[in-house]
Image (cartoon, helix red, strand yellow):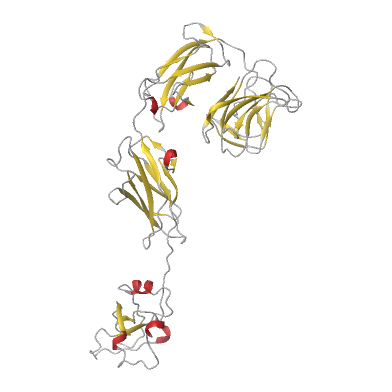
Amino acid sequence: MELFQHGHRPLAELGGTRPRTTWANNASTWGLWLSTAWTQSCNDTRKRVEFGGGNLLSATQQATGWAIMTVGLREVDEAHNEPWKKFDAGTALLSIEYNSYPNKPDQLSVDNKPCATGPNRPYVTTTRPVLRARLSDPDAAQLLNGGFSWARPGTPLSRDHYSGQDNIANGGTLTVRVPDGELTDGATYYTQAGVGDYTDLGPSSDFCEFTVDATPPDPPKAVSSTDYLADGGIHGGIGKAGTFTITPPDAHQDDVTGYLYALTPMTQPTAGIIVQARADKSAAVPIVPTIDGVNVLRIWARDKAGNLSDIVHPLTYTFSAGEGALPVGQWSFTEGSGTAVADGIGGHPLTLSGGTWTSGRPGSAISLGNAWGHTNGKVLTTNAGFSVAAWVRLTDTGQWRTAVSQDGTHASGFFLQYDKDADAWAFTLPGSDADNAPLARAVSAANAQVGVWTHLTGV
């Protein structure tokens, strides 16, 4: 038996079947063949017959919006009178499984860096970056497939430069590593993600751009300090900040965006602190020794992609620091739970009001969203020289954040904080313990980084 479309256009235009339609007068209205099914029953048993495949799907899709789609059944060979058939018209039905188009891919990243274009495009340190995008579909249980294409600006995307992935769970992540030989160091590319559900293709993602920079920068040329001379003598002391000036390399200075330094007892870049370069590619860094005696400062240059100059052979600067004044308070947050934090040096335990314990750098830390900690009484005398330091990690830039302060009668003696207006770290000192006292403020040259552990020191 064969299924045919009766007429090629909607009923309102062609008419389809009419009350007077008979087998003798409808030969001209049989239209497109849709599907064929074979069945037999030798004992007159009722049998269900299903028609699928062929042109049935495309014809049904074409009829979207029509008032009526008329189909008819007939024998493969109507001139052949041996088969006998009878149909129960009351059981005939058309079953359609509706498929939603996949959603547009989102949450794109290039080597874990957010999608961007133009001057904000990310730099990556490899010619084989990992491209990611979230794939989703309105049909909850739908498996998806997808892929990324990439090309140089001005060149169209094509399947010649493409990599894909199958069987991705709805809401899962498409993850593609660009194959060897596809990208060139120093070149800029754009990329786009596509998605399908094995029936339909969804809309393509927004474009992302990235620049490949797999070449490390040259090491810094020199470092000097008038506060801590490298002359073998003892200068300054523990807790006393000194300014260290870093001179950029002679060549390829445009590639340098900043520096990373590690001071004894830290020796590896993984424990280092990032500082941004100034317009002339130099940097002036306030550094506070934490041990007396010989200190070794190790410095690496850093480029836009995050590459460091020769890891094994950093620029080094050796100086000696005195014992200095002992700290009057130190809270290491080693407890990991509870509301009490011990003062490891003085007698000023910290009591937490709210907050959540989390991982620190290293060990434990406390997350102080809408929470705080306080001591019973003051710790510092702020009308003389003092310093205060803290490791902090900013979670968002939506409001001012104070890491450390000490209350006075009318005004706090200092604030070590995030300045929302400047999007930078700040050390603020009121001129007196009075209402509306004038403020002196030192602000970091570089913007504060979200999600990055940062060592703050106010002197």
Q: Position of residue 158 (x, y in %)?
A: 30, 51
Regarding residue 289, the answer to whether it shows in the image is no
User: Considering depth in this image, is 56 or 435 the residue closer to the camera?
Assistant: 435
User: Considering depth in this image, is 390 or 161 the residue closer to the camera?
Assistant: 161
Residue depicted at 24% across the width and 86% down the height: 77
Q: Position of residue 250 (x, y in %)?
A: 37, 20
Residue 260 sits in quarter:
top left
User: Considering depth in this image, is 356 or 217 the residue closer to the camera?
Assistant: 217
Q: Quadrant of the N terminus?
A: bottom left
Q: Taking 193 as reference, is 242 left or right?
A: right
- Position of residue 274 relative to residue 381, above or below, is below
Q: Quadrant of the C terminus?
A: top right
Tally of marks: 0
Q: Taking 273 as reference, is 379 left or right?
A: right
Q: Taking 161 as reference, is 283 left or right?
A: right
Q: Position of residue 205 (x, y in %)?
A: 41, 52
Residue depicted at 47% across the width and 60% down the height: 138
Q: Position of residue 217 (x, y in %)?
A: 37, 26
- Position of residue 287 relative to residue 89, above or below, is above
Regarding residue 155, the answer to whether it shows in the image is yes
- Position of residue 149 relative to residue 345, above or below, is below
